[in-house]
Image (cartoon, grey):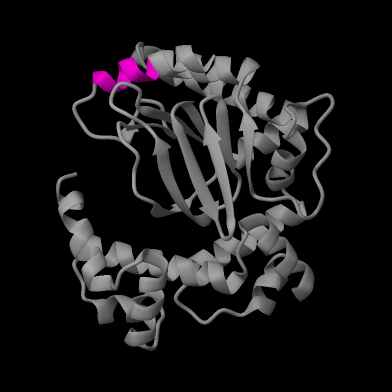
Amino acid sequence: MSAPLAAAMLRYTQRQTAQSPYATAIDGVLILRSDHPTPPSYRLASPAMCIVAQGAKWATFGGSQLEYRAGQALVVGVEAPSLGRVFEARPDEPCLVLIVELDLGELRSVVEQMPRPPVAASQRARGVLVTDFDGPLADCALRLVRLLDTPEAVATIAPLIRREMSYWLLAGPHGGEVARFALADSPSQRVMNAIRSLRQRYAAPIHVDELASVAQLSRSAFHRQFKALTSLTPVQYQKQLRLLEARRLMLSQAIGVEAAAFAVGYESASQFSREYARMFGAPPSRDTKQLRPALEAG
């Protein structure tokens, strides 16, 4: 099924005048096209299915690297810093990726309506996984892309197809893992509540006991489940979040290195520069100078 999906996505991208990533008429659905391998890039991943129709990518969460290629999807159930790269792409066979944001509330609603809901996975289930993308799921993805040819039908039909995708994802071989981070009172969902709290206050000093209290877990259980979900400790998560936000501020608002460091919670600009270079491979001034031309070019 990846060949028809790739053909439909290729036709869509060839009609576009902007550059990838392409926002579509369907809310929460993006199409990525890369004609060449890309350098590694950091981003804050959100709950989504990243479906590869052609080419191949890898993504790293903490110390765990996941590779996914045509016919496979990366399923992300938790907001977490990640490093990703397209490593198989060429002009005559570009890498094509369909990104469908996951609505955890809708997943929860679908679970509640299933006559035989999936059994939630173990307490240390990961928040990211790679799954084969075939059968009914692949059929849904193809219908979703083809729907872009009839914009007047999007508002009515797209929500139905996306809900169907939620069903087949839960009914598939990884349904228990998906259910775990969707169910409202699961330990994973409570850890995700703590992650949201951390994201809202990322510039403040971190207090693991407070986060554990939000998750309604002991400190040790919270620490274990946080790392199982994100592949990072809470301190590592906060550090990467701070550095990503500082990079965004320097690029989008053209503020200086010291101002960016203090804005995201660092007390020492020199420590900030050291940790920034360790994460992004270059000191802040050089890194942003290299990135700005591409940003200004769109």
Taking the image as shown, residue 56 lies to the left or right of residue 254, namely right
* Along the viewing direction, whichever of 226 and 97 lies nearer the viewer: 97
Q: Quadrant of residue 16?
A: top left
Q: Which residues are magenta?
A: 8-15
Q: Report the residue at 74% width, 45% height from top.
A: 180
> Does residue 157 show up?
no
Q: Quadrant of the C terminus?
A: top left
Rendered view: 19 above or below 38: above
Q: Quadrant of residue 222?
A: bottom right
User: Residue 262: horizontal and vertical position, in percent?
Assistant: 34, 81
Taking the image as shown, residue 109 lies to the left or right of residue 141, namely right
The dominant secondary structure in magenta is helix
Rendered view: 103 above or below 218: above
> Does residue 289 show up?
yes
Asked if residue 11 is among those painted magenta in the image, a careful observer would answer yes
Asked if residue 92 is among those painted magenta in the image, a careful observer would answer no
Rendered view: 113 above or below 224: above
Taking the image as shown, residue 235 lies to the left or right of residue 289, namely right
User: Residue 89: horizontal and vertical position, in percent?
Assistant: 37, 31
User: Residue 122: horizontal and vertical position, in percent?
Assistant: 82, 49
Q: Report the residue at 72% width, 35% height from top.
A: 174
